[in-house]
Image: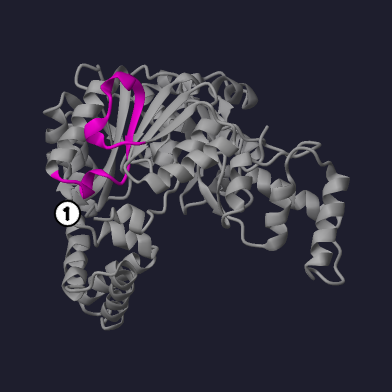
């Protein structure tokens, strides 16, 4: 029988929330002492072609990474990319969970993304048992899974698609027929009908995803969403406890009326119960849950001193000039926003946005804003992080804030660009480089060309490809393009 992952390759991608840096930040904020990200050992279960691990290994050359997957084709692709990059700190192996050699441990960070809800119960138990056996004392495990109650919506559509596909075996035909059904379901609904609006929104969400995701996520043989409290109970049977959710914006819920927040605060001493009620409120469909050893001492009380160990960065921008009383509004790239008249908060946000994408150490930021109250600055960073305006890091991203004399773009991104427009940034996010000129510029940035050489070669490329007729590329345009690549975190220091 052909492995479905060999039949239809699963599109791998980096996921910021599962970066060891994110895991270390949340462990630090909860009173743990995680291994330094720049000198750690990390394991990914179900690594695919290494799209998540390889960019991390490039940025953290003194750390060690192991990825396993049963899909030989995906592993071969990842091994080829790692070899092209000359990486000696990563090992990608064709290996089943059942045959994983425990002596490869211990690992400081263990990642299982997009795996848990799509395997049989015995394999779920193996994931947790392996994580317990191979986890360092202050280590962190990341597990993502389909969550209930929101998972019922995806389950409903899955059952409709499986009914529609009965008797259809060809993979491409299954994908095409499933997408056709989703379009039909979405187009048939009236927005004034609650069921219709719900079904239309969920069908359109599924249609936004590539067919390969649909094939492996919704149309697979095993599809097992579960409630958060059930997952925590499963983990506890293996000696693991709930640490946190991997999203920094969930440090403090803010989207509910105050009376709801007050009720949730009454559950502060019972974090599992609080999280479960939050899932009810949000109709959560997917979770990125962090676990640690039950023996690890956690402190969930807010402690400003822990942020002193971290770095901060922000892509937020001031929305306009100060208003009455000096109030300024800052807006983040994902729709987050805050308004503040607090001088220290404004100074911190301006300083971070000016130095983006560089991350500033807490002490450096404190010096820049001329503040003497470290506690106040730590509290500002905590709340702006929870609001989605500030990123916290345990290890600063290895990107340049400004293009150098001979700009060097990420070798990972330049290799990826030869395969398609989607590339991984040095902040472990994905961006799409669409235009021919933009793609060519990125490919030219190998660190050997100065501005004059770049301008000459880019101009010749535009001429030979009949681009920009009558509008030559000038030095100012080149500089703007380089600055844009720097802000996207695609240039290496």
**Measuring 29% from the left and 19% from the top, which residue is drawn there?**
103
Quadrant in the picture for residue 204 = bottom left
Tell me if 120 is positioned left or right of 109 in this view: left
Instruction: Point out residue 129 in the picture as x, y percentages from the top left corner.
Output: 19, 28
**Left or right placement of residue 441 versus residue 271 in this view:** right
Relative to 353, is 332 on the left or the right?
A: left
Q: Is 400 colored magenta in this rendering?
A: no
User: Residue 428 or 283: which is nearer the viewer?
Assistant: 428
Q: Position of residue 67 (x, y in %)?
A: 39, 34
Going 16% across and 67% down the picture, which residue do you hit? 159
Residue at (40, 30) in percent of width and height: 66
* Label 1: element kind: loop
Above-or-below relation of 119 to 399: below
Which of 346/67 is in front? 67
Quadrant of residue 410 within the rendered picture? top right
Q: Is residue 116 magenta?
A: yes
Residue 453 percent across, percent down from the top left: 86, 47
**Residue 248 image position (x, y, % from top left):** 38, 38
Give 242 or 421, whichever is nearer the viewer. Answer: 421
Q: Decide: few, some or many residues near mark 1? Use Cα within 10 Å; few <14, some 14-19, many ≥20.
A: many
Whether residue 88 is visible: yes
- Residue tagged 1: 149
Q: Which residues are magenta?
A: 94-120
Image vertical order of residue 302 relative to residue 420, above or below: above
Residue displayed at 46% across by 50% down = 336
Image quadrant containing the N terminus = bottom left
Residue 31 visible in this rendered orientation of the protein: no
Check the image and report above or below for 165 versus 89.
Answer: below
Tell me: residue 51, above or below residue 418. Answer: above
């Amino acid at each position: 029988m052909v492995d479905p992952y060999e039949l239809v390759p699963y599109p791998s991608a980096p996921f910021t929330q599962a970066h060891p840096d994110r895991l270390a930040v949340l462990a630090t904020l909860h009173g743990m002492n995680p291994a330094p990200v720049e000198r750690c050992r990390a394991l990914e279960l179900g690594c695919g072609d290494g799209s998540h691990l390889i960019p991390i290994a490039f940025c953290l050359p003194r750390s060690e990474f192991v990825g396993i997957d049963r899909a030989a084709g995906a592993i071969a692709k990842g091994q080829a990319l790692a070899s092209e990059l000359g990486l000696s700190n990563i090992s990608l192996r064709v290996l089943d969970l059942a045959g994983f050699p425990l002596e490869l441990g211990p690992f400081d960070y263990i990642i299982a993304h997009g795996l848990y809800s799509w395997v049989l119960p015995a394999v779920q138990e193996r994931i947790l048992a392996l994580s317990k056996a191979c986890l360092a004392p202050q280590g962190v495990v990341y597990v993502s899974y389909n969550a209930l109650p929101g998972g019922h919506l995806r389950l409903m559509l899955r059952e409709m698609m499986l009914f529609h596909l009965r008797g259809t075996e060809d993979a491409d035909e299954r994908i095409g027929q499933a997408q056709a059904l989703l379009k039909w379901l979405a187009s048939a609904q009236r927005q004034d009908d609650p069921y219709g609006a719900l079904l239309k929104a969920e069908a359109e969400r599924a249609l936004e995803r590539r067919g390969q995701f649909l094939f492996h996520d919704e149309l697979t043989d095993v599809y097992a969403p579960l409630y958060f409290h059930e997952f925590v109970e499963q983990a506890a049977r293996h000696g693991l406890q709930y640490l946190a959710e991997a999203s920094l914006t969930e440090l403090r819920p803010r989207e509910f009326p105050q009376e709801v927040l007050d009720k949730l605060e009454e559950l502060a001493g019972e974090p599992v119960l609080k999280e479960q009620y939050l899932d009810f409120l949000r109709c959560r469909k997917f979770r990125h849950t962090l676990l640690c050893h039950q023996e690890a001492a956690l402190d969930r009380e807010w402690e400003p001193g822990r942020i002193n160990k971290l770095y901060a960065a922000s892509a937020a921008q001031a929305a306009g000039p100060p208003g009455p009383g000096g109030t300024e509004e800052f807006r983040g790239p994902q729709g987050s926003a805050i308004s503040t008249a607090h001088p220290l908060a404004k100074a911190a946000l301006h300083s971070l946005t000016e130095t983006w994408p560089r991350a500033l150490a807490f002490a450096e930021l404190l010096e820049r804003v001329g503040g003497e109250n470290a506690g106040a600055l730590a509290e500002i960073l905590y709340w702006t992080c929870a609001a989605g305006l500030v990123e916290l890091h345990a290890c600063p991203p290895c990107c340049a804030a400004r293009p150098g004399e001979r700009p060097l773009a990420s070798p990972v991104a330049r290799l990826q660009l030869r395969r398609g427009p989607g590339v991984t940034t040095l902040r472990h996010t994905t961006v799409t480089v669409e235009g021919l000129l933009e793609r060519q510029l990125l490919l030219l940035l190998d660190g050997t060309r100065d501005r004059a050489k770049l301008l000459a070669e880019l101009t010749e490329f535009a001429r030979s490809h009949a681009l920009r007729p009558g509008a030559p590329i000038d030095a100012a345009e080149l500089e703007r393009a380089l600055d844009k690549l720097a802000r996207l975190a695609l240039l290496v220091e």
